[in-house]
């Protein structure tokens, strides 16, 4: 049956078909346009990658100071900010017509809103080109997620540094004399800034309320979050490391902190402990070095000329001011120590189990009532005359650490104690430090300190003798009586301290006043470090120096002589000196003149086959020619030569004699009491220089 086609139906259909054909041609051009934009996107992505690499490079220096770790909530906020960024903002140098801006402005539905869904225009209409931008942002977000969080460019830290710099500029512009700054002038007259009260802000600083502003600043609060997520590239900063780091919060700004008292403190509180492979000392060294590697503490050397000393040889450190303020904020919130609202260390300990002796705040300690019964640690921060009454000390029933002595690197800090009555009843005490305290002639009975592991009496210049009951401290692992120059003998029975690992300041005097001799130390099977002082009146028995070899566990030995020249009849005893096979460090001080001249017979590679560190300080040594052949050569890696006026040797000659050397330090006296002349050589630094010179 023939179908009749009405003209009024056919004509509109033809018009629609022609219109659709025309629109299809236009859509094809739009698709080509989108394709070109996507190709431009492929050009943009390498530029984004290049931006990422530059960003990572910029953050490398930041990592040397502190690693900024953010919690998940903060990281989500950062990603949200990234998602709100236009693609064109990634590189502001891109022209506006580039891909990010164009694609973001395209709405394909606007091409022909009247087209039916089944038409080709409808298919294109269902394309949401903004999804392309979203996918690009998602890709960039993924790339950023792959960046080590340690390497995030923390503008916050720069902001804090800039704020501190601006505050410093404000302080500099303040008038030197003003009614409100009279007391600050007196502070300036003090000889040493670290002798002032800890964190004792100047009056103008406090008047501007800067300490509280910094502690309450939102930037500081975010910086505090970094403490909860601190980690290094290889080792997560564990709770142990965090607690050790918090101990730095009590030290005054710019203080130079000695490493050894710090590690002793950590051992006393149990923050570091021995493992199957390492002693507590070695674990403490690892913690100290890890904090330094992460830039949380910085090395300090006696001479500014020392630049390349290995981390393992660093004995003192400082902390950057903004790191210290972050720690104060964390320690205050955690009640690790107690601080005032402006960050000043308080003498109170109502909330904390640690009390600090602070200059000018002794009344707070004296009026503490019975609160000291719960104290874990008592630490003398900067009180030159700590006066602790007998009744107060007797209440320290749970105390494990009593640091009354000096922790500073400088020996000029003066501390006096009139009486130690009440000391000796602390049954849980593990660490007692009286380092550098004057007016201590003798110690009270210490038999009650049954848990004592570390007794630090270094530089107690008035100390004349040790208590006889010290030999009853069966848990004692460390005894330091070095630089106690009035101490002329060791108590009999010292060899009964079978747990002893470190003994410093062992005195050899005349036969009558030295009941404990080197031969007695052979019974100390755990002794790793030993320092011996040979007095000016010392009489060395025949073969006594050969006993060193029998201390099988000994790894480090220091010998100091108090005589300039060996007396006749003592040469054989001197030459009989021999060493244990495990000895890795030998420190010789004030070596006396012998007969014949030259190095002693025992200072030879064949006598010290495993020696890695050799320190020679002062004395009459004039040559390092050991005279051995047959392939015997030094395996020493660290060599320090100090104040050897008769030794004339160049660095090249030293390297020839010590072929495995990694670090050399030479110190000479300056003329007319000028500063010491210090020079150093570091193999790693020399290798870097050679590599840079070879690179075109």
Image: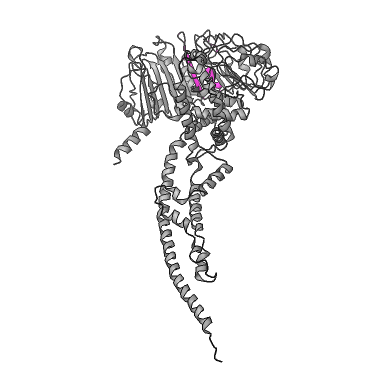
Asked if one can make out residue 469 in the rendered structure from this viewpoint, the answer is yes
Q: Nearer the viewer, residue 247 or 457?
A: 247
Q: Kindly indicate the quadrant of the structure image that contains residue 673.
A: top left
Q: Quadrant of the C terminus?
A: top left
Taking the spot 52% from the left edge, 26% from the top edge, the residue there is 553
Q: 94 left or right of 374?
A: left
Horizontal and vertical percent position of residue 518:
51, 17
Q: Kindly indicate the quadrant of the structure image that contains residue 369.
A: top right
Q: Quadrant of the N terminus?
A: bottom right
Image position of 328 with respect to 131: above or below: above
Horizontal and vertical percent position of residue 468:
61, 12
Image position of 280 with respect to 96: above or below: above
Image position of 229 with respect to 449: above or below: below
Q: 153 left or right of 334?
A: left
Taking the spot 46% from the left edge, 57% from the top edge, the residue there is 103
Q: Which residues are magenta?
A: 514-540
Query: Is residue 490 on the magenta stretch?
Result: no
Horizontal and vertical percent position of residue 196:
52, 16
């Amino acid at each position: 049956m023939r179908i009749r086609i009405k003209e009024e139906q056919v004509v509109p259909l033809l018009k629609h078909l022609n219109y659709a054909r025309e629109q299809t041609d236009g859509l094809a051009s739009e698709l080509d346009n989108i394709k070109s934009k996507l190709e431009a996107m492929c050009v943009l992505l390498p530029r984004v990658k290049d931006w990422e690499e530059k960003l990572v490079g910029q953050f490398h220096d930041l990592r040397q100071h502190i690693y900024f770790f953010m919690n998940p909530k903060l990281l989500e906020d950062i990603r949200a900010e990234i998602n709100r960024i236009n693609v064109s903002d990634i590189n502001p140098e891109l022209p506006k017509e580039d891909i990010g801006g164009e694609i973001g402005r395209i709405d394909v539905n606007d091409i022909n809103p009247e087209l039916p869904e089944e038409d080709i225009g409808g298919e294109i209409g269902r394309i949401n080109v903004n999804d392309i931008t979203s996918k690009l942002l998602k890709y960039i977000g993924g790339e950023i997620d792959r960046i080590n969080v340690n390497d995030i460019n923390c503008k916050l830290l720069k902001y804090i540094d800039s704020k501190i710099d601006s505050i410093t500029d404000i302080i500099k512009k303040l008038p030197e004399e003003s009614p409100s700054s009279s007391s600050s002038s007196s502070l300036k007259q003090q000889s040493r800034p670290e002798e002032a009260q800890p964190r004792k802000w100047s009056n103008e600083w406090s008047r501007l309320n800067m300490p509280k502003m910094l502690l309450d600043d939102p930037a500081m609060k975010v910086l505090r979050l970094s403490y909860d997520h601190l980690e290094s590239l290889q080792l997560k900063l564990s709770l142990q490391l965090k607690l050790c780091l918090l101990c730095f919060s009590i030290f005054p700004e710019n203080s130079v902190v000695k490493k050894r008292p710090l590690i002793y403190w950590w051992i006393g509180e149990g923050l570091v402990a021995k493992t199957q492979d390492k002693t507590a000392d070695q674990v403490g060294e690892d913690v100290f070095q890890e904090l330094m590697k992460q830039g949380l503490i910085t090395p300090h050397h006696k001479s500014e000329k020392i630049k390349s000393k290995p981390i393992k040889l660093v004995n003192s450190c400082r902390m950057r001011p903004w790191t210290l303020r972050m720690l104060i904020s964390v320690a205050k919130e955690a009640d690790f120590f107690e601080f005032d609202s402006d960050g000043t260390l308080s003498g109170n300990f109502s909330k904390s189990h640690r009390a600090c002796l602070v200059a000018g705040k002794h009344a707070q300690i004296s009026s503490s009532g019975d609160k000291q019964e719960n104290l874990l640690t008592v630490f003398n921060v900067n009180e030159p005359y700590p006066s602790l009454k007998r009744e107060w000390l007797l209440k320290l029933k749970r105390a494990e650490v009593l640091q009354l002595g000096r922790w500073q690197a400088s020996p000029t800090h003066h501390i006096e104690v009139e009486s130690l009555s009440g000391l000796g009843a602390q049954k849980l005490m593990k660490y007692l430090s009286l380092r550098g305290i004057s007016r201590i002639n003798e110690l009270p009975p210490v038999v009650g300190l049954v848990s004592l592991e570390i007794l630090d009496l270094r530089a107690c210049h008035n100390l004349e003798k040790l208590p006889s009951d010290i030999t009853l401290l069966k848990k004692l692992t460390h005894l330091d009586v070095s630089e106690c120059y009035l101490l002329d003998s060791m108590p009999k029975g010292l060899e009964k301290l079978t747990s002893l690992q470190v003994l410093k300041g062992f005195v050899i005097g005349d036969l009558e006043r030295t009941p404990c001799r080197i031969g007695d130390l052979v019974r100390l099977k755990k002794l790793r470090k030993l320092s011996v002082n040979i007095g000016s009146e010392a009489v060395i028995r025949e073969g006594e120096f050969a006993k060193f070899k029998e201390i099988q566990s000994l790894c480090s030995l220091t010998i100091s002589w108090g005589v300039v020249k060996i007396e006749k009849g003592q040469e054989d005893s001197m030459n009989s000196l021999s060493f244990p096979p495990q000895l890795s460090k030998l420190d010789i001080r004030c070596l006396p003149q012998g007969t014949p001249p030259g190095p002693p017979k025992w200072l030879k590679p064949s006598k010290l086959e495993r020696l890695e560190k050799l320190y020679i300080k002062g004395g009459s040594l004039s040559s390092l020619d050991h005279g051995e052949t047959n392939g015997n050569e030094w395996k020493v890696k660290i060599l320090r030569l100090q104040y050897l006026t008769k030794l004339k040797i160049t660095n090249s000659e030293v390297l020839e004699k010590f072929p495995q050397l990694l670090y050399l330090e030479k110190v000479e006296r300056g003329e007319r009491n000028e500063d010491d002349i210090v020079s150093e050589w570091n193999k790693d630094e020399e290798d870097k220089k050679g590599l840079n010179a070879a690179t075109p």
